[in-house]
Image (cartoon, rainbow, N blue to C red):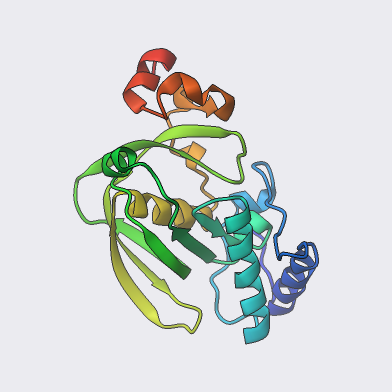
Amino acid sequence: MNPEYTNQEIQALVLAVLETADDNLVLPIVQLGHPVLRQQAVAYTGQLDQPLLEQLLSAMRQTMYHAPGVGMAAPQVGIPLQIAVLEDLYPVPEEIAAEREREPLEYFEIFNPTYAATTDREAVFYEGCLSFEGFQGVVTRPADITATYEDRDGAQHSREFSGWQSRIVQHETDHLSGVVYVDKSETRSLINEQELWRHESLDVDTAKKVLNF
Protein backbone atom coordinates (compact mmCIF):
# COMPACT_ATOMS: atom_id res chain seq x y z
CA MET A 1 0.00 0.00 0.00
CA ASN A 2 1.29 3.45 -0.90
CA PRO A 3 1.50 5.98 1.95
CA GLU A 4 -0.82 8.97 1.99
CA TYR A 5 0.60 12.42 2.64
CA THR A 6 -0.95 15.64 3.84
CA ASN A 7 0.17 18.88 2.22
CA GLN A 8 2.03 19.72 5.41
CA GLU A 9 3.90 16.40 5.33
CA ILE A 10 4.91 16.95 1.70
CA GLN A 11 6.11 20.47 2.49
CA ALA A 12 8.12 19.25 5.47
CA LEU A 13 9.66 16.45 3.39
CA VAL A 14 10.68 18.82 0.61
CA LEU A 15 12.24 21.22 3.11
CA ALA A 16 14.14 18.36 4.74
CA VAL A 17 15.43 17.13 1.38
CA LEU A 18 16.50 20.62 0.30
CA GLU A 19 18.52 20.92 3.50
CA THR A 20 20.69 18.06 2.25
CA ALA A 21 21.74 19.97 -0.90
CA ASP A 22 25.34 21.06 -1.23
CA ASP A 23 26.44 24.59 -2.06
CA ASN A 24 25.62 23.98 -5.74
CA LEU A 25 22.06 22.79 -4.97
CA VAL A 26 23.02 19.19 -5.74
CA LEU A 27 20.93 16.64 -3.84
CA PRO A 28 21.76 13.03 -2.92
CA ILE A 29 20.17 10.57 -5.37
CA VAL A 30 18.39 7.65 -3.71
CA GLN A 31 19.27 4.17 -4.97
CA LEU A 32 17.23 1.12 -5.90
CA GLY A 33 15.88 -0.40 -2.71
CA HIS A 34 14.66 2.91 -1.29
CA PRO A 35 10.87 2.57 -0.83
CA VAL A 36 10.08 5.87 -2.55
CA LEU A 37 11.26 4.39 -5.87
CA ARG A 38 8.57 1.72 -5.61
CA GLN A 39 5.63 3.94 -4.69
CA GLN A 40 2.99 5.55 -6.84
CA ALA A 41 3.95 9.20 -6.55
CA VAL A 42 1.34 11.69 -5.39
CA ALA A 43 -0.24 13.91 -8.04
CA TYR A 44 1.02 17.47 -7.80
CA THR A 45 -1.92 19.70 -6.92
CA GLY A 46 -0.15 22.78 -5.61
CA GLN A 47 1.13 21.32 -2.35
CA LEU A 48 4.16 23.65 -2.49
CA ASP A 49 4.10 27.42 -2.57
CA GLN A 50 5.83 29.04 -5.54
CA PRO A 51 9.20 29.80 -3.87
CA LEU A 52 9.48 26.27 -2.46
CA LEU A 53 8.50 24.71 -5.78
CA GLU A 54 11.09 26.79 -7.60
CA GLN A 55 13.76 25.75 -5.08
CA LEU A 56 12.90 22.10 -5.61
CA LEU A 57 12.95 22.37 -9.41
CA SER A 58 16.28 24.22 -9.33
CA ALA A 59 17.80 21.57 -7.08
CA MET A 60 16.48 18.73 -9.25
CA ARG A 61 17.89 20.41 -12.34
CA GLN A 62 21.31 20.95 -10.78
CA THR A 63 21.33 17.37 -9.52
CA MET A 64 20.56 16.13 -13.04
CA TYR A 65 23.41 18.20 -14.49
CA HIS A 66 25.87 17.11 -11.82
CA ALA A 67 25.14 13.37 -12.19
CA PRO A 68 25.19 13.85 -15.24
CA GLY A 69 21.87 12.66 -16.61
CA VAL A 70 19.10 13.53 -19.04
CA GLY A 71 16.23 13.40 -16.56
CA MET A 72 15.49 13.52 -12.86
CA ALA A 73 12.22 12.49 -11.22
CA ALA A 74 11.27 13.76 -7.76
CA PRO A 75 11.24 10.24 -6.25
CA GLN A 76 14.93 9.94 -7.17
CA VAL A 77 15.68 12.59 -4.57
CA GLY A 78 13.28 11.06 -2.07
CA ILE A 79 10.15 13.08 -2.81
CA PRO A 80 6.96 11.17 -3.80
CA LEU A 81 5.53 13.84 -6.11
CA GLN A 82 4.70 13.49 -9.80
CA ILE A 83 7.34 15.93 -10.99
CA ALA A 84 10.32 15.43 -13.29
CA VAL A 85 12.82 17.60 -15.13
CA LEU A 86 14.29 16.60 -18.51
CA GLU A 87 17.03 17.84 -20.83
CA ASP A 88 19.38 16.22 -23.34
CA LEU A 89 21.81 18.63 -24.98
CA TYR A 90 24.93 16.48 -24.61
CA PRO A 91 27.07 16.14 -27.75
CA VAL A 92 27.14 12.61 -29.18
CA PRO A 93 28.83 11.22 -32.30
CA GLU A 94 26.67 11.56 -35.40
CA GLU A 95 26.62 7.80 -36.00
CA ILE A 96 25.29 7.06 -32.51
CA ALA A 97 22.80 9.92 -32.70
CA ALA A 98 21.44 8.56 -35.98
CA GLU A 99 21.22 4.97 -34.71
CA ARG A 100 19.34 6.01 -31.58
CA GLU A 101 17.29 8.80 -33.22
CA ARG A 102 18.82 11.09 -30.64
CA GLU A 103 17.81 14.71 -31.16
CA PRO A 104 18.53 17.58 -28.75
CA LEU A 105 15.90 17.96 -26.03
CA GLU A 106 15.61 21.42 -24.51
CA TYR A 107 14.99 21.68 -20.77
CA PHE A 108 11.40 21.28 -19.66
CA GLU A 109 9.41 20.10 -16.66
CA ILE A 110 6.56 17.63 -16.43
CA PHE A 111 3.91 17.41 -13.73
CA ASN A 112 1.41 14.53 -13.51
CA PRO A 113 2.49 13.06 -16.87
CA THR A 114 1.11 10.13 -18.84
CA TYR A 115 2.15 8.70 -22.19
CA ALA A 116 0.74 6.43 -24.88
CA ALA A 117 2.24 4.86 -27.99
CA THR A 118 1.13 6.43 -31.25
CA THR A 119 2.59 3.81 -33.64
CA ASP A 120 3.55 0.13 -33.54
CA ARG A 121 7.21 1.04 -33.96
CA GLU A 122 9.56 -0.14 -31.19
CA ALA A 123 13.09 0.83 -30.21
CA VAL A 124 15.52 -1.54 -28.49
CA PHE A 125 18.50 0.03 -26.73
CA TYR A 126 20.50 0.04 -23.55
CA GLU A 127 19.50 2.55 -20.91
CA GLY A 128 20.64 3.31 -17.40
CA CYS A 129 19.34 5.04 -14.31
CA LEU A 130 20.93 7.40 -11.81
CA SER A 131 19.14 5.43 -9.08
CA PHE A 132 20.78 2.17 -10.17
CA GLU A 133 24.35 3.32 -10.44
CA GLY A 134 26.88 1.35 -12.42
CA PHE A 135 24.52 -0.74 -14.57
CA GLN A 136 22.68 -0.55 -17.85
CA GLY A 137 20.18 -2.88 -19.50
CA VAL A 138 18.35 -3.36 -22.78
CA VAL A 139 14.77 -2.07 -22.76
CA THR A 140 12.24 -2.31 -25.59
CA ARG A 141 10.00 0.75 -25.66
CA PRO A 142 7.52 2.39 -28.02
CA ALA A 143 9.50 4.55 -30.42
CA ASP A 144 6.72 7.13 -30.85
CA ILE A 145 4.51 8.46 -28.08
CA THR A 146 2.21 11.27 -27.13
CA ALA A 147 2.81 12.62 -23.63
CA THR A 148 0.30 14.68 -21.68
CA TYR A 149 1.47 16.68 -18.70
CA GLU A 150 1.15 19.96 -16.84
CA ASP A 151 3.77 22.65 -16.40
CA ARG A 152 4.67 24.40 -13.14
CA ASP A 153 1.80 26.85 -13.65
CA GLY A 154 -0.76 24.09 -14.11
CA ALA A 155 -1.20 24.55 -17.87
CA GLN A 156 -1.99 21.35 -19.78
CA HIS A 157 0.26 20.16 -22.61
CA SER A 158 0.16 17.37 -25.16
CA ARG A 159 3.36 16.74 -27.07
CA GLU A 160 4.68 14.06 -29.41
CA PHE A 161 8.11 12.49 -28.94
CA SER A 162 10.07 10.00 -31.02
CA GLY A 163 13.34 8.10 -30.73
CA TRP A 164 15.60 8.87 -27.80
CA GLN A 165 13.42 11.75 -26.60
CA SER A 166 10.55 9.30 -26.33
CA ARG A 167 12.72 6.96 -24.23
CA ILE A 168 13.66 9.75 -21.82
CA VAL A 169 10.04 10.83 -21.31
CA GLN A 170 8.92 7.24 -20.73
CA HIS A 171 11.77 6.51 -18.32
CA GLU A 172 11.06 9.56 -16.14
CA THR A 173 7.28 9.12 -16.26
CA ASP A 174 7.68 5.48 -15.21
CA HIS A 175 9.55 6.62 -12.10
CA LEU A 176 6.42 8.44 -10.97
CA SER A 177 4.52 5.14 -10.94
CA GLY A 178 7.16 3.26 -8.97
CA VAL A 179 8.59 1.62 -12.10
CA VAL A 180 12.35 1.42 -12.72
CA TYR A 181 13.80 0.50 -16.09
CA VAL A 182 15.07 -2.86 -14.79
CA ASP A 183 11.41 -3.92 -14.47
CA LYS A 184 11.16 -3.71 -18.27
CA SER A 185 14.67 -4.80 -19.22
CA GLU A 186 16.05 -8.03 -20.62
CA THR A 187 17.59 -9.18 -17.35
CA ARG A 188 20.39 -11.10 -19.05
CA SER A 189 21.40 -7.89 -20.81
CA LEU A 190 22.25 -6.12 -17.55
CA ILE A 191 25.83 -4.99 -17.66
CA ASN A 192 28.14 -3.26 -15.23
CA GLU A 193 29.56 -0.11 -16.77
CA GLN A 194 33.11 -1.44 -16.24
CA GLU A 195 32.27 -4.05 -18.89
CA LEU A 196 30.99 -1.64 -21.53
CA TRP A 197 34.17 -1.85 -23.59
CA ARG A 198 33.23 -5.39 -24.54
CA HIS A 199 30.13 -4.29 -26.41
CA GLU A 200 31.23 -1.67 -28.92
CA SER A 201 29.62 1.35 -27.24
CA LEU A 202 26.55 -0.60 -26.16
CA ASP A 203 25.86 -2.20 -29.52
CA VAL A 204 22.82 -4.36 -28.76
CA ASP A 205 23.50 -7.00 -31.40
CA THR A 206 27.01 -7.59 -30.08
CA ALA A 207 25.79 -7.68 -26.48
CA LYS A 208 23.13 -10.27 -27.41
CA LYS A 209 25.78 -12.59 -28.77
CA VAL A 210 28.09 -12.18 -25.77
CA LEU A 211 25.44 -12.28 -23.03
CA ASN A 212 23.04 -14.73 -24.69
CA PHE A 213 19.77 -12.84 -24.40
Q: Pick whichever, 103 or 212, lies toward us.
A: 103
**Residue at 40% across, 21% down:** 207
**Residue at 77% across, 65% down:** 23
Please say if 191 is above or below 185. Answer: above
Name the spot of residue 113 as percent of width and height, x first. 43, 66
Classify residue 142 as left or right of residue 181: left
Whether residue 121 is visible to the viewer of this picture, yes or no, is yes
Q: Quadrant of residue 24?
A: bottom right
Please say if 91 is above or below 42. Answer: above
**Residue at 55% across, 74% down:** 44
Name the spot of residue 125 as percent of width and height, x first. 36, 36
**Residue at 60% across, 71% down:** 57
Classify residue 127 as left or right of residue 158: right
* Quadrant housing the C terminus: top left
Whether residue 1 is visible to the viewer of this picture, yes or no, is no
* Quadrant housing the N terminus: bottom right
Q: Pick whichever, 52 or 61, lies toward us.
A: 61
Q: Pick whichever, 44 or 134, lies toward us.
A: 134
Name the spot of residue 139 as percent of width and height, x first. 39, 37
Q: Quadrant of residue 55?
A: bottom right
Classify residue 143 as left or right of residue 54: left
Q: State how many labels appear.
A: 0
Name the spot of residue 175 as percent of width and height, x first. 52, 53
Please say if 191 is above or below 170. Answer: above
